Structures are given as structure tokens and as C-alpha cells.
């Protein structure tokens, strides 16, 4: 690291759990963020600010006025622009020392697996069940750690799935049915700071995985009730009948 990097990241390098070695691991890491909406916005910004060396951003949507209430990586002047391009501009303005690759496309199974195989961690910040199932399948196939977050109304949840660990469940162990009832923010609404909390925690778990520090939510589901400010954890177990893992 050069002097500018040492100064930029000095506050986290001071932490004994991070240090120079942990910062170098961040600088050498590649992270794929799928979805640059309410979850992906804070997750990407914190990972960029922390010095994750290469961020790959995947989204096939454009910025809409209704997004700006919670998708803080975009601004009013970005309306109509592809979210990955808007996000890339924001991230490079925040930290020009990192590399940001926009993927303005809806990935099919082959492309999804190809991109996931090249990264260290995947953040699922998508907003629909078929995409989540496809991401999980590709992460299981490539043995890539998956950090999955979701939020709606004033509730959120977060978990870490590590297919390279023999006892770790996968996302389909948690949601085995393809016919599960799916709600969206468009239908039921969302309070902006809730996605901010979940997205920030996704970035935190990613950094811990990359640096190899602390305990992650592998094997646990974190549930957040923002209305009553209650946090709870539910133990997850591997489903022996899971069709994926």
C-alpha cells in the first residue's frame, strides 16, 4: 500500500482484527453485487469506501424517481440512466482507487456461474425469488460464499451461506418451495433505513469473510423488526432433502 492508501484506510487498519494484512486482503478481493437498489446501494458504497479492490455490479434496470427514497447510490440527475452506470460513477467518486465493472444485463445461468466463479463473495441484493434461486444455485455450483439480504415494510432478514462448508445450509434449505408467496416493495412499501441496515450488514459480513475475522451468520438467519427495534437469530440447518445442496 502507498501512503495515500494508508491514510485513507487508517481508521480500520488501526483495528487489531484488520491491520495491514486485513486491508491488503480487502484490496485484493473481488465482490459481485447483484442488484443496485435499496440493499445494493449501501452495501456497494461501504465496500468501496473500505477499499475492496474490485466490485462487479449487476443490474438491468434504470433509475426511476420512485427509487430515490431508498436507493442512495443514485441521485435525481441519474433518472433514466442504467443503475450500474449511476452506481459506478458514485463509487469511483467515493474511491477512485478501486475497480468497478458494470454488468448491465440480466444474467442467464451460464453467465451467472461464469461471473460468480471469478469472485470471492457474492451479495444477493435482488428483489425477486427466481433470481435468488438462480444465484444460490450458481454459488452452490462454484462453492462461493453468498450473503443474502431482504427487506420489506419495516422488517428485514440476513444470512450467510457457505457451500464450501459441509454443514452450511443453502438458500433453498431456507426456502425449499418454488411456489412461495412473494411480496414486493412496490406492493407493500418499505421504510428506507431498513434496507440501509440490511445492506450495511451485508457489506460487514462480506468484509469479515474476506479478512477471515470474527463469526459470520453462516447457519443463522438474522431477523430485524425495525418498528419495535428487535433483533433475533434463528438457527438454520441443512435440509437433507434440499434439491440444490
Image: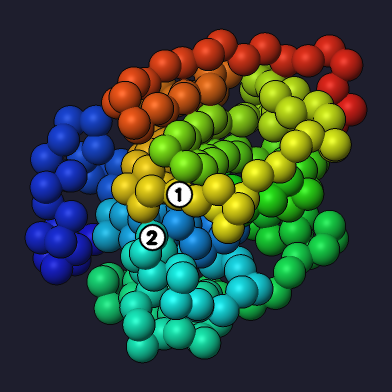
- Residue 143 in the image: above or below residue 82: above
- Residue 98 image offset from top left, x and y in percent: 36, 69
Depth check, front residue: 77 or 23 = 77
Depth check, front residue: 84 or 49 = 84
- Residue 32 image offset from top left, x and y in percent: 56, 57
- Residue 118 image offset from top left, x and y in percent: 65, 57
Which label sits in the foreground, 1 or 2?
Answer: 1
The part of the image, by quadrant, that contains residue 137 is top right
Residue 81 appears in the picture as rendered: yes
- Residue 140 falls left or right of residue 37: right
The part of the image, by quadrant, that contains residue 35 is bottom right
- Furthest residue toward front: 188
**Secondary element type, mark 1:** loop
Residue 200's disc number? none
**Secondary element type, mark 2:** loop
Q: Quadrant of the N terminus?
A: bottom left
Depth check, front residue: 36 or 1 = 36
Residue bearing the label numbered 2: 70
Total count of labels = 2
- Residue 191 falls left or right of residue 181: left
Residue bearing the label numbered 1: 190
- Residue 36 falls left or right of residue 175: left
The residue depicted at 34 percent of the width and 31 percent of the height is: 227
- Residue 12 image offset from top left, x and y in percent: 18, 44
Residue 135 appears in the picture as rendered: no
- Residue 220 falls left or right of residue 65: right
The residue depicted at 42 percent of the width and 38 percent of the height is: 154
Residues at badges 1 and 2 in contact (C-beta under 8 Å)? Answer: yes
Amino acid at each position: 500500500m502507498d501512503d495515500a492508501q494508508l491514510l485513507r484506510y487508517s481508521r480500520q487498519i488501526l483495528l487489531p482484527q484488520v491491520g495491514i494484512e486485513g486491508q491488503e486482503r480487502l484490496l485484493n478481493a473481488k465482490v459481485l453485487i447483484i442488484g443496485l437498489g435499496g440493499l445494493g446501494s449501501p452495501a456497494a458504497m461501504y465496500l468501496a469506501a473500505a477499499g475492496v479492490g474490485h466490485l462487479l455490479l449487476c443490474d438491468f434496470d434504470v433509475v426511476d424517481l420512485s427509487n430515490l427514497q431508498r436507493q442512495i447510490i443514485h441521485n435525481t440527475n441519474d433518472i433514466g440512466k442504467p443503475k450500474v452506470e449511476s452506481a459506478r460513477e458514485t463509487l469511483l467518486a467515493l474511491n477512485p482507487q478501486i475497480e468497478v465493472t458494470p454488468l448491465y444485463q440480466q444474467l442467464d445461468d451460464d453467465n451467472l456461474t461464469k461471473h460468480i466463479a471469478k469472485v470471492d463473495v457474492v451479495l444477493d441484493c435482488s428483489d425477486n425469488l427466481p433470481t435468488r434461486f438462480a444465484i444460490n444455485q450458481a454459488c452452490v455450483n462454484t462453492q462461493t460464499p453468498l450473503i443474502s439480504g431482504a427487506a420489506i415494510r419495516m422488517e428485514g432478514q440476513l444470512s450467510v451461506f457457505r457451500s464450501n462448508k459441509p454443514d452450511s445450509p443453502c438458500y433453498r434449505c431456507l426456502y425449499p418451495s418454488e411456489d412461495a408467496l412473494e411480496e414486493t416493495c412496490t406492493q407493500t412499501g418499505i421504510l428506507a433505513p431498513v434496507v440501509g441496515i440490511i445492506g450495511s450488514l451485508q457489506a460487514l459480513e462480506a468484509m469479515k469473510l474476506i479478512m477471515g475475522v470474527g463469526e459470520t451468520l453462516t447457519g443463522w438467519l438474522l431477523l430485524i423488526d425495525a418498528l419495535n427495534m428487535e433483533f433475533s437469530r434463528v438457527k438454520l440447518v441443512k435440509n437433507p432433502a434440499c434439491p440444490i445442496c
